[in-house]
Amino acid sequence: MTPGARRPGRRALAAALLLPLALAACGKRGPPVAPERRLPAAVQDLRGTVVADGVQLAWTLPRIRTDRSALKEIRRTEVYRRLEDGPATQPTRPAILTFGGLFGPPPGIPGFDRVADIAVAEPAPARIQNNQVTYTDAQGLVFGRRYTYVVVAVDEQGRPSPPSNRVVVALAPPPVAPGGLTAQAGDRQVRLSWQAPATLADGSPAPEGLVYDVYRTTSPATAPARPLNPEPLTVTEYVDLGVQNDVSYFYTVRARAGAGGPEGRPSEVATATPEDTTPPAQPRGLVAVLAGQTVRLAWQAVGDADLAGYHVYRSTTPGRDYARLTPTPQPGTTYVDADVRPGQTYYYVVSAVDRARRANESVPSAEVSATLP
């Protein structure tokens, strides 16, 4: 050490010793990652539809970050709404996310109100299925106004995504629920009819050209996902042919003011249970042959798929007063009547019976007779 030079201080010496250790602890060196690149990617597919209860929003949760790296988890989604007070032709203002600060505005999107905070683990009243979120906003909405919506996804570390695409929804009033829905069950079909609503949800008269959607479930507690009819109905009746016998179905109908208009509330539920009312074909080819002191009957088989069997009837008067000899339908196409007396003429017919809940019986076969000697 040269004369006059100052001895290094303890702090400088400690820093010199710790610097190599700190560099070694950093591992592989590389450029730092900008914090904004680690944010969740923005929702790209937000969409909104006017429904009976308000505005239904739907979107897909992001699976990547803004740098396109994998995103482990989205904890929640924030829904923002803004009332548009300008004309419909005026472009909507952008949505800019602010993170807040000591002297700045609170976290959020200036000009927007946060109307929902949806936790992925417990999303109710929203629904999440296969990464798809559905939420209905019904808070303080006014018919005839326009609203802009955006959503922000927040990851497990509390980092928010940029705002989603903006969706502007004009809240037009839907029709009130159709009235007088009836459901008449038939054989593998249900015939529906209802009354057209006279007003819209805001009390104004319903316009001409209302259309309808029919919904069906097999449980009154189940909400149907889509209507039965592929195209909107322009009439107040519908025949459902896609049903099974002996199954109970529950129906509702909703009205819309045109094919692209908002859908109103559902009608009252109507229930119907289709049942088989079609009898089997008439048995043919009945013959009666004496076999000792018995009468042996035989006939052609009926080809109905739901055939349960046959009933045999006998009378001592031609064409009437038949008594049934078979307590239950018999499966075969032959029958031996041993309860006969010599010198008596007997008249026989055969019918076919199906397996319906309330069995259907065919018209009787042609009559045949046999006389014991």
Image (cartoon, rainbow, N blue to C red):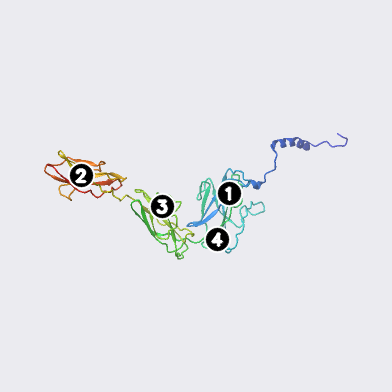
Q: Secondary structure at mark 4?
A: strand
In front of the other: label 2 or label 3? 2
Kindly report the distance in space between the C-alpha atoms of the residues bearing marks 2 and 3: 50 Å
User: Which callout, 3 or 4, points at the residue further toward the start of the chain?
Assistant: 4
Quadrant, the N terminus: top right
> Which residue position holds label 4?
146
Kindly report the distance in space between the C-alpha atoms of the residues bearing marks 1 and 4: 24 Å
Q: Position of residue 328 (x, y in %)?
A: 24, 43
Q: Circle 4: is it few (<14), some (14-19), or many (20+) Cα within 10 Å?
A: some
> Which residue position holds label 3?
216
**Residue with the most extreme bottom position:** 205
Q: Is residue 262 placed above or below 322 in the rendered structure?
A: below
Q: Taking the image as drawn, is residue 138 in sight?
A: no
Task: Please give left or right for residue 373 compared with residue 329 in the image.
Answer: left
Task: Please give left or right for residue 303 compared with residue 229 in the image.
Answer: left
Kindly report the distance in space between the C-alpha atoms of the residues bearing marks 3 and 1: 35 Å
Kindly report the distance in space between the C-alpha atoms of the residues bearing marks 2 and 4: 81 Å
